Amino acid sequence: MKGLKLKNGYTLMEMMLVVAIMGVLILAAPRTFIKTYQFVQLLTARVEIQKNARGALANINRDLRQALGHTIEVYELPGQPPHSLIKFKKYDSSGGQAWVFYYQQGTQLYQAAGDASGNILTGKLIANNLRYIAFTYPRTDDDGIISISITFEKATYEGGTKALQMAVEKVRIMN
Amino acid sequence: MKKHPETSTAALPAPSRPGITLVELMVAMVIMSVGVLGMVGGFKYFNVGVQSAKTRSLANNIAQERVEYLKNRSYYRVLVTTQTVPADTNFTPPMIYDHAPNGEEVVNVGGLNFTRRVLIRKVNENAGGDLTYLNWNDPDTGLKEIKVIVAWYERGEWRKLEVTNLRENPARINKTSIIKGYVRDPLNAPVEGAVVRAQERPSMYGETNAAGYYNFSIEAGSYTLLAVKDGWFPGTLPQFSLAAGETSPDENFTLTQMSSGTVIGKAYVRDHLVISQVVGGTVTASGDTEWVEVYNPTTWTWTMATGLGTGANELVRLAYKESAATLFLPDVDYRAVSLAPNAYFIFANTGTILAAGLTLQADAVYDIDSNWANQDDVIVTGSPSPAGYVALLGGAALTEYDTVGWDATGNGIGGKQLAEKYEDEAIEQSIGFEPGEAYTRKTTSAGVTPGQGRCYDSNDNNEDFSGAKPFSSLPHNSAQSEVCNSGTPAAGALVFADDGLSTPVAADSDGKFNLTNVATGTWTVFASTGLAYSSVTVSGGTLNSFVVNAGNIWLSTETTYGYVTGIVRNTAGTALPGIKMFSAGSEQVNTNSSGRYTLPVATGVITVVANYVSQSPSYVELSSMGVSVELGEVAQGVDFTLYYGGRISGRITTNGVDPLPGIPVVGIKDDVEQGNGISDDEGYFTISGSGISTGTYVVVPQLETGEASLPSSTTVTVAAGATAFSSTFSVTGAFGYVTGSVTNGAGKPIATGVLVYVTTATLGAGAYPPDITPALRAGIGVYYAASSNALGNYNIPVKGGYTYNVYAWHTTWSGSTPTTTPKQALGVAVTPGQTVVRNFSW
């Protein structure tokens, strides 16, 4: 028998062990995948909202500071929530003046320029997932300060939990 | 199955390729798991990084908002932090922030609680252009630093973000001019630590450095300078004017130091009766006469018995104890009951003492066998005789006033060689107390001087008594008095003078003191042991290096106080006599002719008030807080500078009648704010304090934008000691608040934002708010608006005194289609300063 090499097969026990372990893994895997997926979704939502909120506020803030206080108007596009649009004239980089619009259209925030007579031109999407925006004067007889309240909301998973950020900023109008 | 033998018909079999064993597979799985788990762990840090950036940027927004809000208020309504304790020890170093009047608030954003705090401080721009912080109760310099701190708790740790901003009073005058110079003594040596002050602006001053140089920045104007340093005569310079941006030429002072010298003396305590002589036996023809003489060194009369005669009438009585024998408390027949200051009182075993040619009536006769006819031998004498002691006891409690004990170390009587009671050391005797021997208390430490009170008492029997046989110092009775020149040396007594230059010293074990560096002039020197104190007036003359003996100071007045000394001057540096000084829980004293005071005060940390209740009406009342004094000790240098002062009063109303509380009012003199007050619940305000000196003031209520006052300001003249009524101001447009919560159908707060408008106008049912156009803003109707916050609350300040309509719009979304539902609350009356609550639910 010298030199004869037998290849031992897996025993039944080994096979059953393997099958059992794999069974456990397979059962656990979807749950882990779902959790991971939800986590990633939540994370993505938060990051996106964060980006949106920061970007949008920074944009509006910067422009509003350069606005000519007496040119500001607040209203809304037809069918949209009240006072979700602001229109104002600001100094542009060449020293001239230009109309600027920020407004809500559905759940999106747009920025638009205006023509010479102040009519709104086609807007540019600057943020999604907009839940609420309102431009308010704390008091209309003082046009030196305006308050922006903005909320972003994004569905994450199973329709239940939502990432939400609300920010309020008071802006001093410099001109 | 049959096994095949190995054949050689084929080539060598291909080398067998071993499969992966189960163990290898599992090891591989384990390694992979570690890797995968590691990656999952990495996700956590990725998340933390994102969160961290998010919260920091949120905190920044929250801080910025507060800064904008504060900077948008009028300068005077940016309220300076007055209370900063306790500090937040979650931070290192502990975070100091405003507890009052601004307080902190919690802002919830994105599910995180941010605590928003502020710290608002007055700052001063010094000559170098740097900013220094001032106390909140210092005069306003027209510049405030606003620091907003947002703190939050994240991942087991407190974090913070600070935003700092300066708020300048638009009416502030820049301190662009500089006054500088040197302060030197007559020998041209620099004087360090002198304070040079512009009298027209007492809040502006400089202090000289080691080179005698001072400088300080100030507004343009005309100034008189005053240089002051304790122990030096003050100096002034005539008025000069300074233009904006100008630096003065060197304004130099030559100050002369007050001369000083030394006060020496001795301090004694005299607070109890002393046994002044003991004679244990004379062996005369009429019997063995013995007596105990008592002296009263105190300043008051002692009552020795409740009545004349025998019986239970003893108040002060004798006791004698022979060593290793029973204590005798003989019955006493009092022939006199009172013991005047500096007088004697003699207890004897006979009514008439005949000794050494003297006939003396006893004040009290003592007896042990109730046979008053015979002379009882109470005090055992002999050669040899046993040791013993005599004690003077008082009252039912038999308080020991004084004790004299004597030893008899060579008497050969076992167990009776040492006195059982004595003060420090018993009188050293070999064979004991002999007949014809007297123990006489010394008149001073030097010995017994005839004609002086026998009162030297260093609480050491052997030191204080001199023995003589036959006795030479004759006894006295209550008809005789002699002045005491000593007492108990007040070892360790605190001795100080009210000259403002010297520092307190302690008396040595003999009661001697040596108070150096006392300014020339006439001062009061105090000595205090904490239980008793006394004072003498000492004139140090006018020459430098004087030495004056204050003599003996007898501490005979009981005290439960500590002391505070100092000087009160006016702004011209002149000492003010007759200024009432007060501290709670003690008597009031007036400053003396040199403006100095020594105030007995309750011990502990106290507040000293100068010119209490403005008793001198021409000056303001000032207080010095946090003076720490221990029993019998002295806190020196609590000095005051009083301003000529008065008060400005007035009233703030909404309509001339109804009060408007909480409106700050400032008094402005020469375009600089000198003081301010805030209207109380009845609308009255009083501007007082260190800044309101005499002169003409413009009184201005400090209003928010949108408010108006009638009159807008008034001018009043404040005379010394008078209250000038400025005006009744009517402030219109003062604010009230509309506030409330917004909730959904389930009663949960709406966190996404609800638009709220408050207006006197009436909107149509279901209508949107009007377009806010330039035309609308220029119109007469005012709209107030805000969005509710993440906690579902809103707060809108509106002009008080009107009835408003409140409208709210909540938008819900179905996909990208909005549905906006309005709500309203009509007829909401808002009064100034009040808050009206209107909640909305969808």
Image (tube, coloured by chain):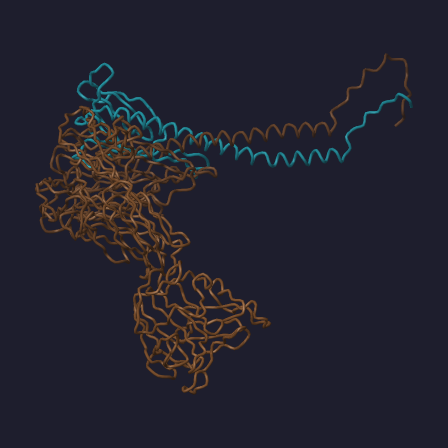
Residue B797 image position (x, y, % from top left): 21, 42
Determine the image quadrant of residue B569.
top left
Residue B423 image position (x, y, % from top left): 46, 64
In the picture, measured across the screen, residue B544 lies left or right of residue B726, that is right
Quarter containing the N terminus of chain A: top right
Q: Which chain is cyan?
A: A
**Residue B764 visible (yes or no):** no
Q: Which chain is brown?
A: B
Give me the residue at 35% from left, 30% from top. A53
**Residue B143 visible (yes or no):** yes
In the picture, measured across the screen, residue B199 lies left or right of residue B301, that is left
Residue B45 image position (x, y, % from top left): 51, 30
The answer to which of B44 and B822 lies nearer the viewer is: B44
Q: Is residue B510 above or below residue B217?
A: below
The answer to which of B58 and B772 lies nearer the viewer is: B58
Residue B258 image position (x, y, % from top left): 25, 39
Q: Is residue B374 above or below residue B533?
A: below
